[in-house]
Image (cartoon, rainbow, N blue to C red):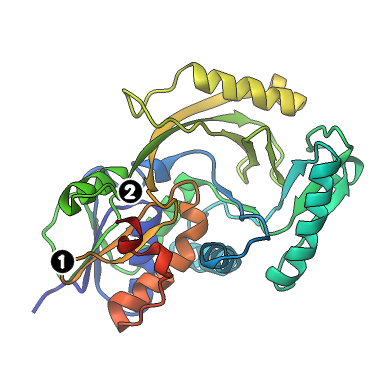
């Protein structure tokens, strides 16, 4: 008889969220991570929970939509249990509209959102004047504004999950043997190890760099412009990011690419020119070959499961990932989309 029902290996966004979902259903869980909670890409700065565009609907977009809708309740429960804020806020997002073609596309997507987002969020075109002071310039004077996009502080979210798990008596440790079902949420190194075991590359790591300004705009929507995310956080900071680097020597070092991000952010939002840069961050994010998360049973390893590959969308996907993984592990109900399974990467 084991003392633990579920061992979760990896204390990032997916690992901690899966642990929390299992604990909520009465399972005894142990989380194991040799580097501690949020030590990998889940300890970054950006925290943009942004949806895919509302068109060409598919299971991945539907899954992400459900997760983003679940997020407010998910983080409220986590914060209520542990007393630590994740910095969650569904504050929306602004995107410049460059030309008439982009405007027509934005208007088509607004119609798509009316159906696909089920009245739970909006995608619409607004003027720069309507958007307020914290808004990017736009060549057309128009912006896309969606009300589904949210933000959270990644390190704060990990801290909030740890506090909630601790409040339920969950052990979080750097070393322990496997007991019960085992969930592998071990980030980019885990994808490399899995690729080696399966003899096929299922995914790898992509380095990202980001920066954090001290600037008060906590109620403002985030901005996506010139391929850059600019996210006002609830603690009076603004995060900007990120790079995508397939090749790298040092996974944790920042360089001139971070300087470039900072300069671009200040061009997009001139108010940031006088704002102090208080943090720079670099880390490697786990990217599956399909770009979708890898979820479900580990082939030929009975009782072992995978929850990995949350490249750029890990925290946004986490509430729904936690739900379907707990369904599978504890109740034997498998509602994981076919494209998310390990077989989809092979």
- The quadrant of the image that shows the C terminus is bottom left
Q: Secondary structure at mark 2?
A: loop
Which label is found at residue 53?
none
Q: Give residue 277's quadrant in the image.
A: top right
* Position in image of residue 99 (x %, y %): 84, 37
Q: Give residue 284's quadrant in the image.
A: top left
The residue wearing badge 2 is 37
Q: Nearer the viewer, residue 248 or 267?
A: 248
Q: Secondary structure at mark 1?
A: loop
Give neighbour class at mark 2: few <14, some 14-19, many 20+ (Cα, 10 Å): many
The residue wearing badge 1 is 301
* Position in image of residue 166 (x %, y %): 33, 62
> What residue is rendered at 83% in x and 34% in y?
138
Whether residue 211 is situated above or below residue 102 in the rendered picture: above
Q: Is residue 51 left or right of residue 305?
A: right
* Position in image of residue 71 (x %, y %): 56, 64
Q: CA distance from mark 1 to mark 2?
A: 25 Å
Give neighbour class at mark 1: few <14, some 14-19, many 20+ (Cα, 10 Å): few
Residue 313 visible in image: yes
Q: Nearer the viewer, residue 124 or 274?
A: 124
> What residue is rendered at 43% in x and 70% in y?
337
Q: Is residue 128 left or right of residue 251?
A: right
């Amino acid at each position: 008889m084991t003392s633990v029902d579920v061992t979760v290996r990896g204390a990032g966004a997916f690992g901690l969220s899966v642990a929390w979902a299992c604990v909520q259903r009465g399972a005894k869980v142990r989380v194991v991570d040799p580097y501690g909670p949020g030590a990998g890409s889940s300890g970054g700065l950006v925290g943009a929970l942004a949806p895919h565009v509302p068109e060409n609907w598919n299971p991945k977009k539907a899954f992400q939509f459900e997760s983003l809708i679940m997020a407010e309740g998910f983080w409220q429960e986590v914060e209520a249990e542990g007393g630590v804020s994740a910095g969650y806020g569904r504050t929306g997002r602004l995107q410049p509209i460059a030309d008439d073609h982009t405007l027509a596309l934005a208007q088509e997507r607004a119609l798509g959102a009316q159906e696909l987002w089920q009245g739970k969020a909006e995608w619409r075109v607004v003027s720069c004047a309507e958007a307020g002071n914290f808004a990017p310039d736009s060549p057309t004077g128009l912006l896309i504004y969606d009300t589904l996009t949210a933000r959270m502080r990644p390190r704060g979210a990990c801290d909030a999950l740890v506090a909630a798990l601790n409040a339920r008596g969950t052990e979080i440790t750097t070393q322990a043997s496997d007991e019960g079902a085992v969930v592998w949420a071990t980030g980019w190194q885990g994808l490399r190890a899995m690729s080696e075991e399966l003899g096929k590359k299922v995914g790898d790591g992509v380095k990202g760099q980001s920066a954090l300004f001290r600037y008060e705009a906590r109620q403002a929507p985030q901005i996506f412009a010139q391929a850059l995310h600019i996210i006002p956080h609830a603690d009076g900071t603004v995060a900007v990011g990120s790079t995508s680097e397939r090749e790298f020597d040092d996974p944790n070092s920042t360089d001139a690419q971070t300087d470039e991000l900072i300069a671009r952010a200040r061009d997009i939002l001139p108010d940031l020119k006088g704002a102090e840069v208080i943090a720079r961050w670099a880390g490697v994010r786990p990217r599956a070959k399909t770009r979708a998360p890898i979820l479900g049973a580990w082939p030929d390893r009975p009782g072992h499961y995978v929850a990995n590959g949350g490249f750029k969308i890990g925290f946004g996907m986490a509430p729904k990932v936690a739900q379907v993984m707990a369904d599978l592990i504890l109740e034997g109900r498998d509602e994981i989309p076919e494209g998310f399974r390990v077989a989809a990467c092979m």
